[in-house]
Amino acid sequence: MSAPVATASIGLETAMREVAGEVDRQFDLLLAVPDDPRAELYKAMRHAAIGGGKRLRPLLTFATADLFAVDRQCTARVATAIEAIHVYSLVHDDLPAMDDDDMRRGKPTVHKLYGESTAILAGDCLHALAFEWLADEGAHPDPFVRVELIACLAASAGPAGMAGGQMMDLEAEKASFDLATVTRLQAMKTGALIACAVEAGAILGRVQPDGRRALRGYARDIGLAFQIADDLLDAEGDEAVAGKALRKDAAAGKETFLSLLGVTRAREQAAMLVDQAIEHLRAYGPEADVLRAVARYITERDH
Amino acid sequence: MSAPVATASIGLETAMREVAGEVDRQFDLLLAVPDDPRAELYKAMRHAAIGGGKRLRPLLTFATADLFAVDRQCTARVATAIEAIHVYSLVHDDLPAMDDDDMRRGKPTVHKLYGESTAILAGDCLHALAFEWLADEGAHPDPFVRVELIACLAASAGPAGMAGGQMMDLEAEKASFDLATVTRLQAMKTGALIACAVEAGAILGRVQPDGRRALRGYARDIGLAFQIADDLLDAEGDEAVAGKALRKDAAAGKETFLSLLGVTRAREQAAMLVDQAIEHLRAYGPEADVLRAVARYITERDH
């Protein structure tokens, strides 16, 4: 992505590949292994961060920022910071005390390779680095834009967002949540960071909060559709393709969209949300085609 | 601290008590327990954050900001954000996979009371909230000041600071570090956040980086003196007074200032650093008396 090719002109698959390559390059640059006793810590961060995942959140930041012709070096840095928060959450969620997973993105989880204490610290470091990268001029020359990006990311990551949703998810094993509570849980656990990835593109584009309403609606709908699709993949998917253990929710007796709605209604709901997400983009022309393609991809993916 | 009493006019003990009270009030306000499945998460954060500790870092932020007549509501918010990072690090450091401690500040550790998964998430949430609070206008009306505070705190918390130092500390059980490496380890593990607490006061006071040199020197010296004093307390202190387990470093075979220097030279070194820290403040008058008193307190405290 050294040449500033806007995502809209290259189609979803190429855009995904280019964004994934750019995020890997950023992590490689930002997580250079030091020649001191912290080398293992950096190797653990690199293992978690580089060379895996769909990079859905960075793709959303790029596709949204491209609507407003944002400098792509800034977008790359911001997208990488948001992905760092996602990666840290995976490292911590996989810990034995949390979901106790051995495989992630087809590789051993960080604590399996580097031990639990290094995994906890690698997650903590990625968490701090995300904010360090956003506070730096490389994220945007205007400090007002940077502080807005930080406010957005911190709120999406904390107890009102991702980490709060993860707490509700742990509680879900003990309680029996209804559809409204599961919807809120998922809107926090995965929806908040997905929404932040879209919002960050709009913040970089200096779109005023009023003008972000349609993009927010789009983000909220694809966030929920993403989670319903995840539930379907968890129930019906192939562990080898997913690169991680599946069918853990049912084993833990947790209520999910699938357990509450059943397969048919869950599929209908996801399809309806995708249509609704695309409808939110009606004010945009072909420049928003990647965002539309992402919405469709979310329910069609196999991992 | 509702009345804007400058720390310098009230003596160290009163200043410590007032700052501790203000930090507790801030945490109480900012961590109100919600009536939903995240209640345990907030209770765990409150258990870790409220009613304990010397509040050394907030005291340093207040005492430094008071040199420059900073709005005390802003200082309170910023000092609380810095303390939140300190508290999150204690919660994670106490985990079974890390230092495996049962007691902290005379109370059971968070994972002992709330379980490991909640402790991990409570730490993660305090980490994110610290940046959310700094990004908010309550920290300072000028976004440029806020973003500088965030950059300072993120760098102090991450792999180049506190978490990197903790990683080196874990490696210290396997390796045999020399004095230079132990000094660097401690400068990162505890020194970086102490330095940030002082620097934050100067950032709030809009002191330009050039003008911060003396305060930086002060902070670096008290940070090292603090750690040497900690080593001495760890070897000679009373667990009941400390409120936590002691003599763990020697048991783990870690090199410390004490093991490398011996008691007599360690004491001399700490006293020399305190004198040097106070000398850095020579350009300031009585308004810096609390900073001077903090430097002396650091080697005279019993916990």
Image (cartoon, coloured by chain):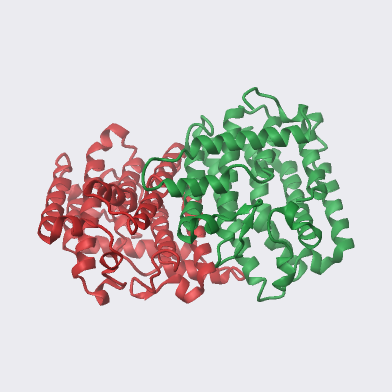
Chain colours: A red, B green
Q: Is residue A86 above or below residue B18?
A: below
Quadrant in which the N terminus of chain A is drawn = bottom left
| The one of B159 and B18 positioned closer to us in this rendering | B18
Q: Is residue A250 above or below residue B5?
A: below
A289 left or right of A163 in image: left
**How far across and down, in percent of the image, does residue B256 sit?**
75, 66
B136 left or right of B298 in image: left
Residue beneath the point at 25% across and 57% down: A255
| The one of A82 and B46 positioned closer to us in this rendering | B46
**How far across and down, in percent of the image, does residue A24 sit?**
39, 65
Residue beneath the point at 45% across and 36% down: A144
Q: Quadrant of residue A226?
A: bottom left
Q: Is residue A87 above or below residue A71?
A: below
B191 left or right of A271 in image: right
**How far across and down, in percent of the image, does residue B235 sit?**
79, 63
Say if residue A140 shows up in the picture.
no
Quadrant in which the C terminus of chain A is drawn = bottom left
**How far across and down, in percent of the image, does residue B199 sit?**
65, 42
| The one of A226 and A203 positioned closer to us in this rendering | A226
Say if residue B210 shows up in the picture.
yes
How many numbered marks have been drawn onto this rendered protein structure? 0
